[in-house]
Amino acid sequence: MLALMADGQSNTQIAATLTLTDAAVSKHIGNVFTKLGLGPVEENRRVRAVLTYLDSARS
């Protein structure tokens, strides 16, 4: 999910790629945000999630 987000795909594009519904993708991404400690009022949480993913991929 994060890899596709890092590629710049929208939720709709991710859903099509993974053959999921938009609602399922939104739920999964919400779970990713929660696991990363990025609450609903966090600014730019999609960008911050992708940056966390990219940082961990480099390590």
Image: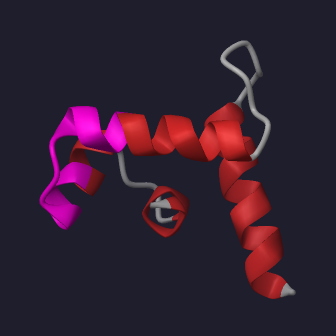
Judge by depth and name the residue closer to the eye, 9 or 26. Answer: 26
Residue at the top extreme? 41
Q: Within the magenta stretch, is there residue 24?
A: yes
The quadrant where residue 48 appears:
top right
Q: Give the residue drawn at x 70%, y 65%.
A: 53
In the depicted structure, whether residue 45 falls above or below residue 50:
above
Count of number-bearing discs? 0
Q: Give the residue drawn at x 37%, y 54%.
A: 9
Task: Tell me the chief SS of the magenta region.
Answer: helix
- In screen coordinates, is 44 left or right of 7? right
Residue at the bottom extreme? 59
Which quadrant, please, contains the C terminus? bottom right
In the depicted structure, whether residue 8 falls above or below residue 10:
below
Q: Give the residue drawn at x 79%, y 37%.
A: 37
* Residue 42 location (% of width, % of height): 77, 21
Question: Which residue range is magenta in the image?
Answer: 15-26
Q: Give the residue drawn at x 21%, y 51%.
A: 15
- In screen coordinates, is 53 left or right of 19? right
Which colour scheme appears in the figure?
secondary structure
* Residue 26 location (% of width, % of height): 37, 35
Residue at the right extreme? 59
* Residue 38 location (% of width, % of height): 75, 32
The quadrant where residue 4 appears:
bottom left
In the depicted structure, whether residue 53 falls above or below residue 23:
below
* Residue 33 location (% of width, % of height): 64, 39
Which quadrant, please, contains the N terminus? bottom left
- In screen coordinates, is 24 left or right of 27? left
